[in-house]
Image (cartoon, grey):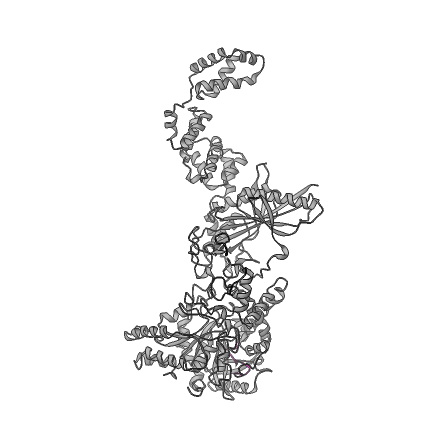
Amino acid sequence: MAWETVIGLEIHSQLNTKSKIFSGASTEYGAEPNTQACAVDLGLPGVLPVLNKEAVNMALRFGLAVNAKINQRSIFARKNYFYPDLPKGYQISQFEIPIVGKGAIGISTKEGGAKMVGITRAHLEEDAGKSIHDLYEDYSAIDLNRAGTPLLEIVSEPDMRSAREAVAYAKKIHALVQYIGICDGNMQEGSFRCDANVSIRKKDTEELGTRTELKNINSFKFLEKAINIEIERQQDILEDGDTVVQETRLYDAEKDETRSMRTKEEANDYRYFPDPDLLPVDIENELLTEIKNSLPELPTEKKNRFVSEFGLSDYDAENLTAQKPLADYYEAMLNDGAEAKVSANWVMGELSAALNKNQIDVQDSPISAKELSELVKRIGDDTISGKIAKDVFKAMWEGNGRVDDIIQNQGLKQMTDVGAIEGIIDGIIANNSEQVEQFKAGNTKLLGYFVGQVMKVTQGKANPKQVNQILNDKLS
Amino acid sequence: MHTLSVAELSKSLKNKEFSSVELTQHYLDRISHSDLNAFITVTDDLALSQARAADAKLANGSGSVLTGIPFAHKDIFCTKGVKTSAGSKILDPFISPYDATVSHKLNIENLVMLGKTNCDEFAMGSSNENSFYGPVKNPWNKTMVPGGSSGGSAAAVAGRLTPFATGTDTGGSIRQPSSLCGITGIKPTYGRVSRYGMIAYASSLDQAGPLTQTAEDAALVLNAIAGFDEKDSTSALRDVPDYTKTLRDSIKGLKIGIPKEFFSEGLDSSVEKVITESIKEFETMGAKLQEISLPNSAYAIPTYYIVAPCECSSNLSRLDGVRYGYRCEDPKNMDDLYLRSRSEGFGDEVKRRIMIGTYALSAGYYDAYYLKAQKVRQLISEDFKKAFQNVDIIMGPVSPTTAFELGAIKDPVSMYLADIYTLSANLAGLPGMSIPAGFSNNLPVGLQMIGNYWSEEVLLNAAHQFQTQTDWHSVLPENI
């Protein structure tokens, strides 16, 4: 049977305000437990919340960046449930009227597909504290530093049809919130968290299948895995003639499985009602205009510019603009005079690989944009070959100096003396008469063998273009 | 000294007739000999040290009109370093680490806190019988209730155990005990006084105000505690007038509306007589009387008993035994910790309202109860808006009866009727006041005055003018 997957994402993006959404306590990550929780965050009797305007401005930045309808009067509501890391016994959130209404964002996948994903809403809310169950044997511990940290919950329409698309969407939102400076995007620290609603239905049918909500996903890799596992699980159930149970499932990265956390019947009745401690949030037109004017170039705009201005492919442009720091790095190289396509290959290839391998952010790269640009320029002016350039890159990464010094000191400058190369090639032809005969008999694949021999003798320094040309001349 | 009003004490302190320490000690002695059970906590040492600080200010002339005046806080205002119980077992162990804005405002004027007064648990009650610390006795007759929920504050002022006290009024909790104890009490417009640090019962209805001997005292205290507070988003960003300035204005031509719905079945006839006579007194003073109608006021009780429980069911969720307050012994697991801490920590009436509110907010019932109640609340407000197009002030009884016997009303719904005339001012957010208007069977009767939004000065002016023509406010219970 052919199945179609339907995915919607709920993304919790921690807003990087200095203080909490309803109190003056700091939001800094990593402080000693319970040192950044004031009377309001502790939910002491009698305390009252006061809305942090900066959080509102950040939500508006997001709303305007995805062309969403802004609700110029939104309401905070209480979501009531008991849990020890929820000090007031309710979370202040938005329910019926969120600050950001319907919007949309474009995504494109490696397969070349491009589509718009609808954003249902984005609302402001406060984060809960953290329960720590493995610190003591007989009891749980609670850290309320995170309690009251502002969150923007971004809810998508069920518009994604594969795990790939879901990841592409999540990455797009991840890039966007960093572009517009409202979230640091740090998934390890929980600043950016995804829950996925997954269901499947028979292909070419309209009605949605029963969905499950996947939680505890803290990387894009796990998002893709968790969704794919869940799709398979649901397919097995339906193909056995059973029904999918609406429930919340926890993704276990270690076991690479999802397991039931609670079913719909066990779900809380949150008893939402408008929070009488807070006034409706009224947004003036002037504020919207001011925020709109303060938005930077957004990822999609930047991507389109990279395509038209630098002649990059859609996919390359998408990749380069996914992270603002990476895009900035790339543009700095071009401003320094490096060629666009070669630079793109180096940034997405060697540089990204090295950064990933060493888990370093591009801002902290040991090779600056200017240095990498010099390297690209040395390839362009035939000082070194692309292959040698990889060795130079390694040396630069290890801090062995600047491009020209490394080329000089290690004698890596490309050999472009035609006479010298010819001499070497003559010697190789003389010593490999058997291969020459086979080549002449039509086994042209052997050209690679001869090139290899030349490179061996010249330690890779011969200009590959010249070597190919001379070999072809001499062997024909 | 204890028969003097705040205004009179202020003059005496300024004239060095006695010191704040002497005055404070006098009240502390009276409290220690009292059997009213009006106080949950008496802060002797703190009071005397505050009195010494006040005396130093008075000596160098830097004090305000209230400097050195002793007072008592309803035990629902958070007071730093002092037990703040809200009359509940669940907060019996709670020492507040911070001051409510009202406390802070009185502290910076160097008033002297004698202690924390008894009240119905979390301000839920009309007789002060719902307190973990036992009922308060009415100074006029110690077998009677003082009213509630600010019963301890009202009894303490009436029994002259303090010159004035603070209170909170969610459905009548300042006005009704003021009426039953024969004192003056004002609930300001919602948003006039900060709610920060006032333990919440129903956030959209709660409002703090003073319980005093006279309208002039109420004006003096309201001057000190009113005003915008950046810590309370629902407090109003608007100027506060000097309420003492307009007290002496003539009330000639004041248009008084008398809602016929406040004189219907259920109103004790001797109470009605007192109220009618006191309103006539205003007419003698030049005011114009006019019958009005508040057609939706009949729905005030059912509306209030949806809105207030809904809000309280959520407000009281923080009392979970996890971070502060009462925790049950040896909880087996998380659910057991919640269940037993709350079951053992809350009293019956509080549990009843939490359950009503939880039910009314549940999926499938929200529209029928909460939303409907909000709509009716809107209608009640509209009634008042219409009425205030023609009148300056509305007058009627505070309570359908005088003080009743301790233990007499066992049925909660009958008890709810005690607030029938006071609830609508809370639902509409309007200022309301109770002033002594006479006696019925040797028990005081209070006249209720309801004003338009932000018109506290109109209420205080009318009340003060009434008190210059009558002396009901200065009649004392026996043995005072």
Q: Main secondary structure of the magenta part?
A: loop
User: Is A403 in the magenta?
Assistant: no
Q: Nearer the viewer, residue B29 or B356?
A: B29
Q: Nearer the viewer, residue B68 or B432?
A: B68
| Residue B462 seen by the camera | no
Split into 4 quadrants, where in the image is the N terminus of chain B?
Answer: bottom left
Residue B388 horizontal/vertical position (percent): 52, 75
Question: On the rendered structure, is A342 left or right of B24?
Answer: right
B397 in the magenta segment: yes
Q: Is residue B55 visible?
A: yes
Compared to residue A129, the image places residue B368 above or below, namely below
Is B267 located above or below residue A431 in the figure?
below
Q: Position of residue B277 (x, y in %)?
A: 51, 87
Q: Give the quadrant of residue A443.
A: top right
Quadrant where the C terminus of chain B sits is bottom left
Q: Which range of residues does the magenta coloring cover? A: B390-404
Q: Residue B318's spot in the image, x, y percent?
A: 51, 63
User: Which residue is found at the position 48% from the left and 20% from the top?
Assistant: A465
